[in-house]
Every structure is written in C-alpha cells, then in structure tokens.
Image: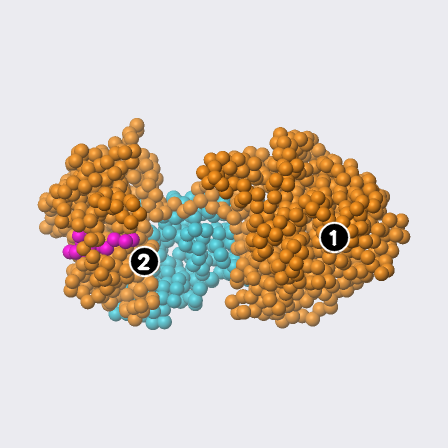
Amino acid sequence: MSTRLAAGGRLLNKEKALSFTFNGKQLRGFEGDTLASALLANDQMLIGRSFKYHRPRGVVASGAEEPNGLVNLGAEGSFEPNQRVTTTELFDGLTATSQNHWPSLEFDVGAINTHLSRFLPAGFYYKMFIHPRPLWKHVYEPFIRQSAGLGRAPKARDADTYEHFYFFCDVMVIGGGVAGLQAAKTAAASGAKVLLIEQTAHWGGRAPVDGGTVDGIPVDNFVEQTVAELEAMPNVTLRKRMMGAGVYDHGYVLGYEQLRDYAPEKPGPRHRLWRIRAGHIVTATGAIERPLSFAGNDIPGVMLASALRDYVVNYGVSAGDRTVIVTNNDDAYLTAFALNYAGLSVPVILDARVLAEDSPAMEQAKAMGIRVMMGHAVAKVKGGKRVTGVAVCSQAGEGAVLEEIACDAVAMSGGWSPVVHLWSHCGGKLSWDDAQAHFRPDVDKAPTGADGQPFVTTAGAASGALHLSDVLGDGDQAGKLAAAASGFKVKQTRCPVGESPEEAPMMPIWLMPQGAGVELRSKSWLDYQNDVKVSDVQLAAQEGFESVEHAKRYTTLGMATDQGKLSNINGLATLAGALNTSIPQVGTTTFRPPYTPISMGAIGGEARGDVFQPVRRTPMHDWHDANGADWEPVGQWRRPYAYLRPGEKVHDAVMRETKNTRENLGLLDASTLGKLIVKGPDAGRFLDMLYTNMMSTLKPGKCRYGLMCSENGFLIDDGVVARIDEETFLCHTTTGGAERIHQHMEEWLQTEWWDWQVYVANVTEQYVQVAVVGPNARTALEKLGGMDVSKEALGFMEWADGELGGFKVRVYRISFSGELSYEIAVDAGHGQAFWDALMVVGNDLGVMPYGTEALHILRAEKGFIMIGDETDGTVIPQDLGLHWAISKKKEDFLGKRAQERSHMTDPTRWKLVGLETLSGAVLPDGAYAVGEGENANGQKNMIGRVTSSYYSPNLGKGIAMGLVLHGPDRMGEVIEFPGTEGATFKARIVDPVFYDKEGEKGNV
Amino acid sequence: MSEPITALAGAASETGIARIMELSLQGMITLRGDLASSAVQKAATGAAEVEMPGTNQANCVEDRGICWMSPDELLILCPYDMVAANIDKMTETLGNAHALAVNVSDARAAFRITGTQAREVLAKLCPVDLSLENFAPGMFRRTRMAQVPAAFWMTDAESFQLVCFRSQARYVFDLLSIAAQPGSGVNAYLT
C-alpha cells in the first residue's frame, strides 16, 4: 500500500486539508501536495494506461520528467488533457480522470495488446498498413485514430484568459536550485539586472531533500537565507511557478508562468507567457535521474529512487512498506536512508557494481542493518497492477533467479543526466562524460550570439556538477561569467563552500542483467509513455535504422509528450550497444522548445474573441451595423457587402442597391480606399516611375486614373491620382493597397531614388470618403449647398475644395460606376455627421446606401477591372486591354522593361473580354473554358477563365469578364465552360462594356 | 459644420489595474523634412511652442508638443482647432525648404493609461522595455501593440499617452482593457 506517513512532509500544511476527486472518487490531501503525492497518499498507485499496450502505469517520477502520470484535469471550460500529476499542485475541488482506458482504469480491454506485443513490434504500423493502399484511408487510419491518443480533446470553449509580458534583463537565471540561487546572487552583486525563475513553487531544487551543508549550515537554511538576500536586492526579480520554456537567438527566452493553476479561485489570467530579452542566460536546470532497464520496470510501484525519497521527505508519503532499491551508484542510497529514517523497511539494496571495498554509502547502509548485494540486479519485477516482489539475479548473468524478495515498491537509479535542453535549443553542443555516463554541455561549443560570443552558460547539475561541493562553485562561476558577458564589472565575492558525502564512482548499466534474453528485454521499458522497449530499439538497429533520428521515428522513442526525458540516454545506449558503437558516436536527437508542453492559450495570449485580429472600422461603421450591414472582410477592414432590410435576403438587397444607384441615388462608404500624399520637387518624376501612365503632366485641379506595376510588369494596384498643387499629388489606392503601396513608395525612395526630393504620407484615415452616385447625385449636393458642382464648374475627372452643407470638403468628380458620381472627402471626425446630412437631403431623391457587391456589379456592367479579380499577380495591363494607360512617351517606369520581354508580348497571352451566357445564366466565378484537344497530361486544353461574374439587375441577365486565348479577336464566338455537377455553360465572347457604351450617363 | 467626434466617444475603463480613457481630439501634424534644417526646426517649434526633442524623445506640454518619429519625421501636437492655422504658419516658415506638413488629427485615436501599474499594461502588449529605469517621461516610442502600430510617451510618472490609427481605436481600447483586467498585475517593476 502507498500511504500517508504520520510524520514528515516538509512542503505540507497539514492544518489545511483539501478534497479532490479521481475518476469520481472523493479523496483527501493537504495544502502543499502535488496531485501525484495526494494520489499516492490515498493508495492510488495505478494512474493511467500506456499508449500502445494499455499497460497499467503509476507515477515513476516526482517532477517535470514524469512520463506516466497524465490525467484529464478539470471539466467544461477548464478541462485540459495530459496534465502531469507530479507538477500539478493540489487545490480544493480538483477533479481528475485517468486517460487511455476502456471501459475502466481497473479493467481495460486494450490491455490485450500487451499479450499481442510480439505481433506489435517497432515499425508495426508502417509494416502492417502499407498494403493494400486503399485500406489505409478507409479502414486502418480511422481505426488507428480511434485507438490512439492519451487525453481527450477539450470540447468546451476555454473559460480562462491568458497574456504575454515583455521583459528585459541583463542576466536571466533559469532554475532556482542551489546553483541558480548562487548564480543569481553573484550576477546581481555586479549590479546586473537579474531575473531568476523557478518552475516549481519552491526554491532550492533537490538540495533540501538530498541534504548537505553550506559553510557548515544545513543546505535548506542556506537556500532560505539566499532567497531572502535576493529578495532584498532591487535589481533582482524572482518568480516561482515559471518555467524556462525555450531559448532562442539574440538572448530571447520564453518564460511560462502559471499564475493560478494552483488556486483557480484567484482572479486574472491563468498563464502569462514572458517574452524575455536577456543579455546572458544561465541555465541552472538541474539533472534528471535515469531509470534502469530491467523486466517489469514499468509496473506501478517501480519508481525513480530520487522520486521515492521526494515523496517521503517532501510530502510524507510512502510508496510501500517494503522497498527494494536497485542502483548502479551511491546516490540511490540516500533513498534507503530516507526510508529508514521514516521507519520503513528496505529489504535489500541491489547494487550492480562490484567494488573492491564498500563505499561510504554502503558502509552506512550496512550500519543501519540494510542488506546490500553487490553485483546483483533485478531479473524481473513481479506483479501486475502493482509490485509484489522482485526476482534477484547476478548482473553479470542472463537472469537466472537466485532469490525472490517480496516488496511493494522498487526504487531504481541508473545515474543522472544533466538537463541540457535549454542549452541545446540554440545550438549548444554536448560532450560525453565517461565517468558519469551522461551527456553534459560542452563549454567550448556554447550557443553564440550575433557577436560570436556565448550567450548561455550552464550552472550546477545542468553542467554535470552533481555534488553540492561542486554545484555552488559552478553556480558562482556562472553568475560571474554572465555578469561579465553582459558588460558588468565582476565583484569578487567569496563562494560559499558546500559539503556532501564522498561517493564511489557509478557504473554505467544499460541492461539488467547484462545478458538478458529476449523474454526479459521485451519487458524492459525504455519509453514508458510510448511503450518502447529495449527489444524495439534493438530491432530498429537490426532493420537498418542506424541513425538516432531514424531509430527515434521508427520506434517512437522519445516522441511522447515527455519528449523522452527519462528514455533518451537509455535508448541511445541501447542503440549504441546494438550497433556495436559508442554512445557519443550515436549522438542525441535534437532538443527543441518547449521544455515541457505549454498551453495553447499562453501562446495565443490576449489574441482571442474580439481581439483575435484587429478589425478596422470606418467612422460610419456603427451606422452601417445598425442599418443592416452584411459584413465583408476587406484586408483588416470590414465593409458592408450589402445593407439588408428586415426580412430581406442578401441577393435581393444587392439587386435593389445596384438598380437604385443607376436609377436614383446611391451612397458608398469609400473611406477604406488608400490616400497617399506625395510631395516634393521630384514628386511628378517619381509618380511617372511608379505609374504606367504619365502623371507629371497632370494639371492641378485634375484627376487621372493610373495603373501601378511591379518591376516584373504585373499589375499591383490602381486608382485615381489628383494633383493638388505644383509639388503635391494625392494618390488613391485600393482598400487593401494603402499600407502596401505606401511601403512600396518608401522602399523605392529610400533604397533607389534616395536623392530625389519626395516625401510620402499616408492620410487614408484622416478622411471619410463618400461616393455620391446616380442621376440624383448633383441634386443632392446642390441641396446641401455651399459650392458649385455643376458640369461647367466641376467637370469629369476634376476636383475642388469647398463647403457642402457647412462641411469643409474636397470633392472629386470621379466614377467607378459610369454614373454621375462625386467622391467627397471630409475630416473623419465629421464623417458620420456628413453621411447623416446626405441621407437627409437624399431622402426624397431615392437615396440608398450600397455595399461592395453592388459596387462590383456596377463596375462590371461598365467593364472596369478590379485589382484582385481581373488581376492575380500574373496579369499585365496589356492583357486587360489597358494599352491606353501605358505611356509610350516615358523613357522608363516600373514594369516597362519586363513588359517588353517575350513572354509578356506573346500573342497567345489570354486577354480580357466580356462573356454572356446564351441562356442568360450567371457563369460560375473562376470557371475555365475548354478548347480542342488535350495536353501532355491527358487533360483538356484550357483556353480561358472567368475573372468576374454577376447577375446584372440593370440588364436582366448574367454578365461576366474573363481572360480568353485570342479573346478580343474572337468576338461573337461561343465557348464552353464546364461547371460542376455535369452542367456546361455556353458563353458568347462580347465587348466587356455591357452598359451605356457611349458613357452618356456620366457625361451630364 | 458639426462638432467633430472621436472614434469611441470618450470610452473609459476604470475597473482594472490601470485606468484607460479615450482622449478628446488632439491636433496632430505630420512634419517630414531634414530635421537638422533650421527652417524645419523653426516650423516645428513655432507651431508647438516647445523646444525640439532629441532622438526618441517627446517634448510635450499639455496639448502642445513635438515627438521624434524617425530621422526625417516629427509629430507636432497642438490644439485641434489650431491645426489649419498652424499648417499655414509652418508652410510659410518652411518657405522653399523641401518638407511636408500634413494634418493627421482625425486619422488617429488617443488614449491615456494611468496608474502605478500602467507600465505593466503596456508591457503586455508592446515589445518595449518599460522598466522605471528604461522608460521615463520625455521618452517617445513608436512600436507594435499586439497586432497594430502605436506610439506612446509619458505625461507624468504614472501616465502614458498613446496614439494609434482611428480605425483601430476599438481594438486598441479592448486590448488595453484586457491587459488591465483585475488580478493581472505583474509586479515586475515594483522594487
């Protein structure tokens, strides 16, 4: 039984009992518990089922490295799968359910896979499901998807909020153990601004549990004292419950702060993602104990030795009355001592080493009356859902059982691996340490910054300094190095001296016993979460997956949510053994951020709901909304597609607006179109280069439509240019083009024509611009009164400043509909009032606002092109019959050279024409026309495509524009456009100007 | 002529860790030119009635001021109803100097963010070092605020004035309100 001990539990507040549920069962714990310690205290050893074989699994570790203890946490809006019980702080009312089992955790049907495991070897899915191919999609994939996955996907909307925080410091120290504390202290002493973060809720790391002294005082006192000193320093920021998730170029670090996972009743955001720029980074991330590979090492009750003593010392929880310890090093003896002090029984320590004489730890164990068996190993662990005993064998042999020892728990230790993840994220290299049998940071191959200098330094166990005596010195050194690297003068401070017991060397053990046969090897787990065994890695090697990256993907070793924190080194060693090469030769897989999974919410930060994306609103946005606007996104703007009257369908509204604008009066909110002021002595010359036509000859007071091409000759924008005065132009752009064209202008001015005297300013949002369109447009403006808008005073393509209805306005007489049309610019602060005034005077003139779809139909009826419809980045003005807008007089303009190249002058380029179906139906937008014959791929030859297609209420039929092979030479011909569902549309090639070809309506 | 209105009609949020308020219309003139030329400097100081600021600085007194926007751009602040007169005056002062002075008052929205934790609210949204030692009154920053451009400066030790594009006023106000939500204090700058 695992249970709560009467005494102990340094992190608990036993005054405060908490209740929680696991699979609906009411359980109790204390404040300070993790979910793992609380479950163990309630004898809940079995926590989940493994991924592939559905084997019973219990907690194996006590921290971020835990592979097994994953649960569904919370419900509804706070539900989250795959939460690690070892890092989840208990709170009152916590609800957790186990994962990956059916129908229940205790009885799981999928567990039959464990008996089929010899039929489910590494690469099983690749081998099994490759043939026959069609079965993959319809049979195999759905089945695998159903049986795969650990937690359930959340269904409800996340009820919490999240945020980011930008922070800057000179030195950032990641990890609040002894090394991190010391590093922070020395760095701060130099005057550097220091940020120290710790992923757990406690300072000191392993030291308070593992013990030792610093300058003669117990290490936990040293921790308290150092934290107090750091808290008193104004240049130090300390944060607990904040993990260093990733280290990136230029000293950029992501810190993942869990603000109220431990106390959900608190207000505010749940997680905060710190986006930190640090001058230098110290990773004091500690080390992780390695499991040993023996048969049955995944049975609940087999735990890391360090975890077992954490549960006893930190939480007063015992994993069982009798614990067998199996080790290849002296560190695991600390667990035996801790258990002994707690009054629990350690029947035997199986030490795989054979030492000439007892190590100090062995002596101490023996003095306590604990049996120590040198050169011995676990042949196999007995038990199913829980350990019942171990079979003992010689490490040197093949597993012949010498003795069976009854026990409830097994504490294993295969040595320690430094946590090198953060060091490695940005390219830090590793070197193999033979003595400790682990990879540690290679100080000569640190991650380097823009100046070629290292920007990450490791400290303490993360450097491979595993003993307190070395840890402090290493942390001290790291702090000084970091301060110096970020430009501070290092203050010579005395480094405190740590003392910890002498240890005999460890001995690498990658398989237990060393000659284990296939029977044992196929029950020796490397990766608990993904169910990868020693035999799987060996099989991968045998089948030719020799690269560690290939073996990883073939076996899925280290690919689970724990990313192989426990399995990595054991897996590589097994692979090296199978390949008969050395471990450094095999190397590691790549360490990638985040260190442990972080919430999607934290990554998104504030960007959800209303602020998921910025929505740009014109000053009349609310009016549009209140008047039935059916919104269309245009860039980041929202524009009314149509204004729906109560009960009206969108199509009907569009038809009504389109017709009314031709017959009476339409108002369009054109504020979103870009307005760029271009000013300077060279402004005319500059615009001549930017537009295909001539702008420098434009007279003040006049407007000209212009086309803009990229240097490759393709159309990128169009719009009306107004000349304001000798040196000043106002260039209209498309709605989506304002920022892009502004940037395009700046780029040419700053990089190519830097000596031209031109300034550009984007004044798009300074003005509301309203298009007043239709036969009654002039009457409406005359009713407002204040300036002469007659044909004589303000001709087509002219502009004038003046007053209308008391508003200061600039009126452009331009038309995108063929109707009599004025576009009127007013300061944005007066925009809504001006719009209201127009609605009032238009009331008895048949005024209706119209949306973007009516705008499109009106321009299509007139054969006007639209950037983004008729153009798609591959279309040149010549394709659209816009030769009239391409100056032949100009020596040069952007795109001119490109348009003279052979592909651009090819007579077979598709050209713009109008299209009318024989039936009057509307052609599908984007449909392709098919011609004679087939291409090399056996497809029908394409001879054109539809670029715009609408129903014209003014003409009572479908109208379209398209690009067609030899189109303008084929007027009157009928071509075929296959549609969907077997329909084919026959359409006649016609002039693209469908309505008022003579332009009489605008000429009034 | 109607009374000009702001984008959000003076929206305010008072419940969070900082107070957020949309400001009334502020006169703003973009001035582009050679900042070393005396004509440009005189045009700027003549309109704003303050001294020229240094690089990355703002020199503001109530609703008048000059903000350094880029090596060839200033933002001139003046009372909203003085903009037209000031542009005329600037044009005159500039004479033949190559420069551009243009009214952008209505193209912007302005907010005030006030409180001891106002800096934290901005630091959640802008990649700027807002620590006490690195951002103080007199400084000016053009930056990114979540997904849109913005610029801000401090009017006193606990108050920021921020400008953004008018069309994004609602987004910016929502961002600030969310970043200031109750219980979200970072306490990273309090020592």
Say which residue label 1 marks: A514
- Type of residue at label 1? Gln
Determine the CA span between mark 1 and mark 2. Answer: 71 Å
Can the viewer see residue A299? yes
Work out whether A522 lies above or below A77: below
Query: Quick one: which chain is orange?
Result: A
Pointers 1 and 2 in contact (C-beta within 8 Å): no
Say which residue label 2 marks: A742
Residue A528 located within the stretch drawn in magenta: no
Residue A407, given in percent of the width and then of the height, sits at 80, 41
Q: What stretch is highlighted in magenta?
A: A873-885
Can the viewer see residue A12? no
Query: Quick one: which chain is cyan?
Result: B
> Which dot, 1 or 2, sits closer to the camera?
1
Residue A876 located within the stretch drawn in magenta: yes
Residue in the picture at 34% in, 52% down:
B107
- Disc number placed over residue A912 in the picture, else none: none
Neighbor class of circle 1 (other Cα within 10 Å; few <14, some 14-19, many 20+) is: some
- Type of residue at label 2? His
Q: In which quarter of the image is the C terminus of chain A?
A: top left
Label 1 resides on the chain identified as A
Pick whichever, A464 or B98, lies toward us: A464
State which tag comes first along the sequence, 1 or 2.
1
Q: Is residue A31 left or right of residue A78?
A: right
Neighbor class of circle 2 (other Cα within 10 Å; few <14, some 14-19, many 20+) is: many
Residue A741, given in percent of the width and then of the height, sits at 30, 57
Residue A733, given in percent of the width and then of the height, sits at 27, 53
State which quadrant residue A388 falls in: top right
Residue in the picture at 21% in, 44% down:
A932
